[in-house]
Image (tube, grey):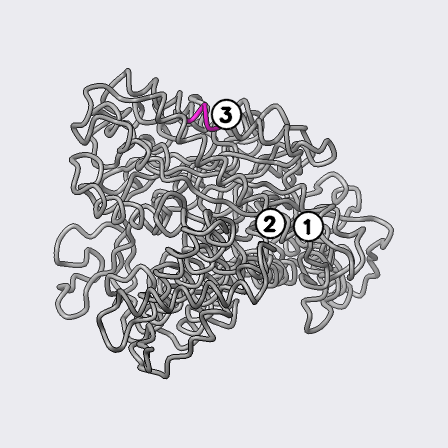
Amino acid sequence: MFKRIIKRDGKIVKFDPEKIANAIAKAGLVTEEFKFDRAKAIADKVLKRAEETIKERTPHVEQIQDIVEDVLMESSFKKTAKEYIQYRQERSRRREAKSDLMTIYKTISHADASEDSDVKRSNANVDGNSAMGKMLQFGAEGSKVFAKTLLLRPDIAAAHDNGDIHIHDLDFYATGTLTCCQSDPFVLFEKGFNTGHGHLRTPNSISSYGALAAILLQANQNEQHGGQSIPNFDYAMAPGVDKSFRKALKRNLDKYNKFTGKKLELDVKDSYKYGDDDKLEKAKWPKTIVQSSNEDVERETMQAMEGFVHNLNTMHSRAGAQVPFTSINFGTDTTPSGRLVSKCLLQATENGLGKGETPIFPISIFKVKSGVNYEPDDPNYDLFKKSMEVSAKRLFPNFCFVDAPYNLKYYKKGDYRTEIATMGCRTRVFASVFPESDGIVTGRGNLSFTTVNLVRIGIKHGICLGERKEADWEGFYRELDEKMDLVKDELLERFEFQANQHVRNFPFLMGQGNWFGSEKLGMNDTLRDVIKHGTLSIGFIGLAETLVAMTGKHHGEDEDSRELGLDIVTHMREKCDEYCKKYKLNFSLLATPAEGIAGRFTKMDRKEYGKIKGVTDREFYTNSFHVPVYFPISAFDKIDIEAPYHNLCNAGHITYIELDGDPSQNIAAFEAVIRKMHDAGIGYGSVNHPVDRDPICGFSGIITGERCPHCGRLEGDVPFEKICNCAKGN
């Protein structure tokens, strides 16, 4: 009989044969095939074989467990054998997860965020070097292990770990949070709102509107793991302009009366608005009073928009380690008040931050609509022109096209809830299987999304490995369906977890009525009846590399591959539509951005299949359905190729166009690109270009050499700052 045994951690402890019998008994108890007496007999057989076959005086625990498996498999207790094997594998997986977690913790603790560490660079919105940033990362990585070990189905967890799929925001899985929300300030401002630390009353000036808009985005960010959006920013801020105008009017009338001795009065029953010239003329006040009031409110609105932009680039969320990931949509309110908000917002974006820095947040999105701002005789055409001038200098705004057929079908003139809006770098929510939320953007968002490694399926069934002369399309689609079904199951499991959370778990998002229908719930109600209005999204990455793996050419260089690419994405969209009908939930297809996931997949596939030209030979797979950025192609051709995918990817999409040089010197070319996007049916587009900054003098623009064109200094020890296109998710 052995006296000692080596544990997995290398420790040598006293050998206890009773533990073998107990482990076998537990398995037998689960399957109900036998009880402890039989387990003791099986354990005796295990011990006898161990003494006969193990030559070492001190065996390893794995050697003993291998013999237990063999003895059980040889017996008639096949169910118990399977249960024991699965239990052993699960324990092994948990130990490995714990070991991996310790390695990750070491990386967080010692590595610098600038180093090549996926963990440290997993969220560009978090300062991975700050104390709180590290604390968040410790919690995030531990939460991922917990979710994979105890919450996820083992085959789903394995698919994520081996790179077949990627479960986004896995660190928030156990919290039950939703991804993002398109907040309507009208709802929150009507009666004021509570952030959990005090009640904020209804704002009564544009300054307060701007401040509270930033606060509501921050408060919502603390209860969700994704981006925060205001889909109707100009509409929502316009009442604040009018309130400030009435205050200015009252103030200037009082000054006039005091100076002249007259008694002109402001009729409290008349709701005077900024720019309401007809009503103001009827009042027969001196023009200087109205002019001064206009100037006052214009100055206050400008300050409010500057404060809003500065706040969103400096205020903290999630324990102070990151700024809220925010986006705002605007440009279609044609009232004087709404137009003033858009004008000042654009100017604040152009001005930049305190030292001229380009503001990354909020991601501003100009909504383009024929009849509103697209044609020269449209009421907001001047704002459209200004938006392009600002974007040519500051990278933002991006452009969202209401006229795209799949957006236009929901549009109702005068109803901002039916104007398409975008969250973050591409996410959208619009259609719904529920009539009450179908075509409504406000109060809705994405629940969760998971991405399929499309490239790996292409490698396995394509010609790139030299194992076949023609692509195995039947095998490709069969495996794609399997992976999509797996992701569907994972999204449904996560939905059930989210649906069983309570309003009290989300006191702002749900408790303040921010989410669609949540105003009808009590604090102890669960969320199923309202989160059903959100979307469950299946994403894909690297269509270009997938096509190269399958056929040898991507869709930017070959007509046949172009058709095949559309076939693949159409198939995925049709599967999502089938899930919608079957499960009565809003499944949708996402054109996943590159970011960190494309690098993760590439590293894993290169390790498995080697460096494959045009497939795994770069650091990242190409963003969603995009034509590769390295491929030489005209802007218009790129738009034509990518436009059909926007209709298919109803959970989110974007097309980027890269311009060299300084586009602010050629606005006509910039406008030609935006108009081409509009006419081609693009849903959401952006123009990327280099933006440099001298941190000494604050110059922002194109710096072509080693000398700042503004102050003339040489770069020297203080380098010029480069804002790369990856800041926009490209």
> Which quarter shows the C terminus?
top left
Residue 240, x across and y down, in percent: 68, 54
Labels 1 and 3: the sequence-earlier one: 3
> Which quarter shows the N terminus?
bottom left
Q: CA distance from mark 1 to mark 2?
A: 7 Å
Residue 102, x across and y down, in percent: 35, 72
Q: Main secondary structure of the magenta part?
A: helix
- Whether residue 288 appears in magenta in the rendering, the answer is no
The residues colored magenta run 569-573
Are there few (<14), some (14-19), or many (20+) residues within 10 Å of tag 3? some
Identify the residue under disc 2: 181
Helix, strand or loop status at disc 3: loop
Labels 1 and 2: the sequence-earlier one: 2
Are there few (<14), some (14-19), or many (20+) residues within 10 Å of tag 2? many
Picture layout, residue 170 above or below residue 47: above
Picture layout, residue 95 above or below residue 244: below
Identify the residue under disc 3: 375
Where residue 292 sits, quadrant-wise, is: bottom right
Residue 653, x across and y down, in percent: 45, 35
Find out whether the residues at labels 1 and 2 contact each other: C-beta distance under 8 Å: yes
Where residue 332 sits, quadrant-wise, is: top right
Q: Residue at (36%, 32%) from the top-left corner?
A: 625
Amino acid type for the residue under numbered disc 2: Cys
Left-right relation of 122 to 647: left
- Of residues 12 and 385, the one nearer the viewer is 12
On residue 377, which mark appears? none
Q: CA distance from mark 3 to mark 2?
A: 31 Å
Identify the residue under disc 1: 515
